[in-house]
């Protein structure tokens, strides 16, 4: 870059900084001070609504090489993609009620969000073309893309977005998106500014709010303002590249290309999804040529795929994981934190990762701060220590152990993890009886969440269980929904007011330095209380025929097939 160009770029940056708010300037100051690297600056910049050209200008002005622009890839149009989804959706396909991986996959083929999260944790515009926070990130303004049509022919406007989000944050609607929005956004905080502008006035400042409106909140599919509950599978009315034309619960679904898609025309003519009850069936289908793509696979349950030259493995690093909640409110030994710590110390985590994932995962430390989060603090790793575990049990009054039931569901490697926990606890004299049920049973029953309680569903009410959790690009949902007092998905029924306050400070923090400070406090609290075991965080992996082109696995669960083709 010549000196003249450098001067012009710096003047442009100075002009931008004069107009920008406190949030944006704090971000630039931290990058200039070396608090984050270029990749983290790009990720956080898009979080706060900075466009990639603007981010590139800032990077260049501060002495970094400009961002490269990827070229277009020519793809072949036509054909129908056969997709295997395992396990099937649980319950009806109603976006705001979704709480499972199968449902997220089936609905995301047709639905779109205000913005989309990328594997590198950056955000891309989708139905919103830009978003901007105020000085403390308590108010966020989203500008909507113009000319977007729903599949019923109507034009998307602010009224549609407002109606969608009011339903998502309504505590009486049964919305599972409260896992993301509880304590952050209320119905009165969603308001229309004009036909192309929506404002979110938050209950409390949230520096990462734009992630909550994106694809990881897979319930947040934008629907028409006059959408009628129960019609999602009957009438095409989303905005995506494909429309749902048939759906048979537990069997499959078919999708056709939507000719009015605002981005043009998707390469594929359509998609045919078959639901499989388990990973083994989906693996057999791919190896036998009955399907082209399996939405998620794991090494432990699909080993033959990893050594087959006719199979392409798609993978991305992620914080997808299994939580092992331990009820803290029942009259049994698990109420004592020393007992929960002892269970945690019985696990040989490196061996678990090797056995179940062939090291395609990272060891967990019983907090939700996975290795992929830049805000994660450097806390000593919890390791297997049977001697200390037995000391803790003696101090708690259980020198000879006790008996307890662990409930889980037959999804991927989870039954094997249950067996490992059972065997590990045996060394402490603890007898664990396993109860492995189908996904339909595990997620059945009411799960309304506080303030009305945790309903009757097994996954929120058993003494100890193993539950699959999808990846979120920031750990907010884990902190509030799974660990916060009266969190809607708090299966441990755990409550710690200090953790609640610290989590609120972490979520509000704009500075990465402040986030790391609060993250360390949170991690230490959770290691002390141990309400939930986090044994590992694994890479998200999909598998497909070598005929599948342009596909990118989504670490967050949804199936995004708008750029996929058959070659």
Image (cartoon, rainbow, N blue to C red):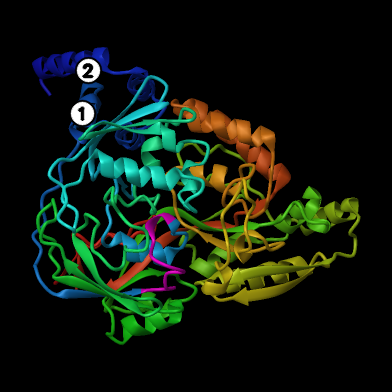
- x and y percentages locating residue 467 in the rendered image: 57, 62
**Residue 241 falls left or right of residue 213:** left
Q: Quadrant of residue 10?
A: top left
Find numbered disc 2 in the image and state the secondary structure of the residue it sits on: helix
Residue 38, above or below 295: above
Identify the image quadrant of the C terminus: bottom left
Q: Are marks 1 and 2 in contact (CB under 8 Å)?
A: yes
Report crowding for label 2: few under 14, some 14 to 19, many 20 or more residues within 10 A (C-alpha).
some
Q: Which mark is residue 303?
A: none
Does label 1 or label 2 sit earlier along the sequence? Answer: 2
**Position of 12 relative to 262 (above/below):** above
User: Visible in this render: residue 122?
Assistant: no
Q: In the depicted view, which residue is nearer to us: 71 or 107?
A: 107
- In this view, the residue farthest toward the bottom is 288
Residue at the spot 27% in from the left edge and 85% down from the top edge: 289
Q: Quadrant of the N terminus?
A: top left
Q: Which mark is residue 16?
A: 2
Q: Residue 234 is drawn in which quadrant?
A: bottom left
Q: Which residues are magenta?
A: 85-96
* Residue 549 in picture, x, y percent from top left: 19, 66
| Mark 1 crowd level (few <14, some 14–19, many ≥20, 10 Å Cα) | some
Q: Residue at x 44, y 30 (%)?
A: 202
Q: Position of residue 316 (x, y in %)?
A: 36, 57
Q: Give the CA distance from mark 1 to mark 2.
A: 9 Å
Label 1 sits on residue: 54
What's the residue at 61%, 37% (across, down)? 522
Verify whether residue 93 appears in magenta.
yes
Q: Nearer the viewer, residue 389 or 242?
A: 242
Prevailing secondary structure class for the magenta stretch in the rendered image:
loop
Q: Nearer the viewer, residue 169 or 291?
A: 169
> With respect to residue 519, does 107 lie above or below?
below
Q: Considering the numbered disc 1 on the image, is that residue within a helix, a strand or a loop?
A: helix
């Amino acid at each position: 870059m010549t000196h003249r160009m450098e001067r012009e770029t710096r003047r442009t940056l100075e002009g931008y900084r004069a107009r920008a708010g406190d949030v944006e300037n704090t971000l630039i100051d931290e990058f200039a001070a070396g608090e984050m690297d270029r990749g983290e600056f790009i990720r956080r910049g898009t979080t706060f609504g900075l466009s990639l050209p603007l981010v590139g200008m800032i990077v260049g002005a501060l002495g970094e090489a400009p961002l490269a622009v990827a070229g277009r890839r020519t793809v072949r149009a036509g054909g129908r993609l056969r997709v295997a989804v395992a396990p099937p959706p649980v319950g009806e396909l109603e976006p705001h009620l979704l709480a499972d991986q199968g449902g997220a996959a089936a609905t995301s083929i047709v639905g779109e969000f205000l913005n989309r999260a990328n594997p590198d944790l950056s955000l891309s515009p989708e139905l919103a073309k830009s978003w901007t926070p105020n000085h403390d990130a308590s108010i966020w303004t989203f500008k909507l893309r113009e000319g977007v049509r729903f599949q019923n022919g109507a034009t998307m406007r602010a009224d549609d977005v407002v109606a969608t989000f009011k339903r998502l944050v309504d505590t009486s609607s049964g919305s599972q998106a409260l896992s993301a929005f509880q304590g952050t956004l209320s119905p009165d905080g969603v308001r229309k500014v004009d036909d192309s502008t929506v404002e979110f006035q938050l209950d409390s400042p949230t520096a990462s709010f734009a992630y909550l409106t994106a694809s990881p909140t897979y319930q947040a599919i934008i629907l028409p303002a006059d959408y009628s509950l129960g019609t999602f599978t009957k009438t095409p009315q989303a905005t995506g590249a494909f429309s749902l034309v048939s759906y048979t619960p537990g069997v499959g679904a078919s999708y056709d290309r939507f000719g009015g898609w605002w981005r043009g025309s998707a390469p594929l003519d359509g998609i045919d999804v078959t639901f499989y009850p388990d990973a083994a069936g989906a693996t057999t289908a791919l190896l036998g040529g009955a399907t082209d793509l399996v939405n998620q696979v794991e090494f432990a349950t699909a080993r033959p795929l990893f050594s087959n030259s006719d199979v392409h493995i798609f993978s991305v690093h992620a914080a997808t994981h299994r939580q092992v909640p331990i009820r803290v409110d029942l009259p049994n030994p698990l109420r004592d934190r020393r007992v929960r710590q002892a269970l945690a110390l019985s696990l040989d985590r490196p061996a678990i990762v090797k056995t179940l994932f062939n090291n395609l995962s990272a060891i967990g430390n019983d907090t939700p701060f996975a290795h992929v989060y830049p805000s994660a603090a450097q806390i000593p790793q919890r390791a297997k220590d049977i001697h200390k575990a037995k000391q803790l049990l003696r101090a708690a009054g259980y020198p000879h152990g006790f008996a307890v039931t662990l409930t889980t569901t037959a999804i991927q490697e989870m039954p094997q993890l249950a067996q490992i926990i059972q065997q590990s606890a045996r060394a402490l004299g603890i007898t664990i009886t396993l109860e492995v049920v189908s996904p339909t049973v595990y997620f059945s029953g009411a799960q309304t969440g506080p303030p009305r309680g945790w309903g009757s569903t097994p996954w929120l009410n058993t003494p100890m269980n193993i539950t699959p959790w999808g990846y979120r690009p920031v750990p907010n949902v884990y902190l509030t929904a799974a660990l916060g007092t009266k969190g809607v998905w708090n299966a441990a029924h755990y409550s710690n007011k200090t953790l609640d306050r610290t989590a609120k400070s972490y979520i509000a923090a704009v500075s990465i330095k402040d986030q790391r400070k609060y993250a360390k406090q949170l991690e230490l609290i959770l290691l002390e209380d141990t309400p939930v075991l986090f044994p590992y965080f694994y890479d998200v992996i999909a598998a497909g025929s070598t005929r599948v082109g342009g596909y990118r696995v989504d670490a967050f669960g949804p199936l995004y097939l708008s750029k996929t083709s058959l070659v």
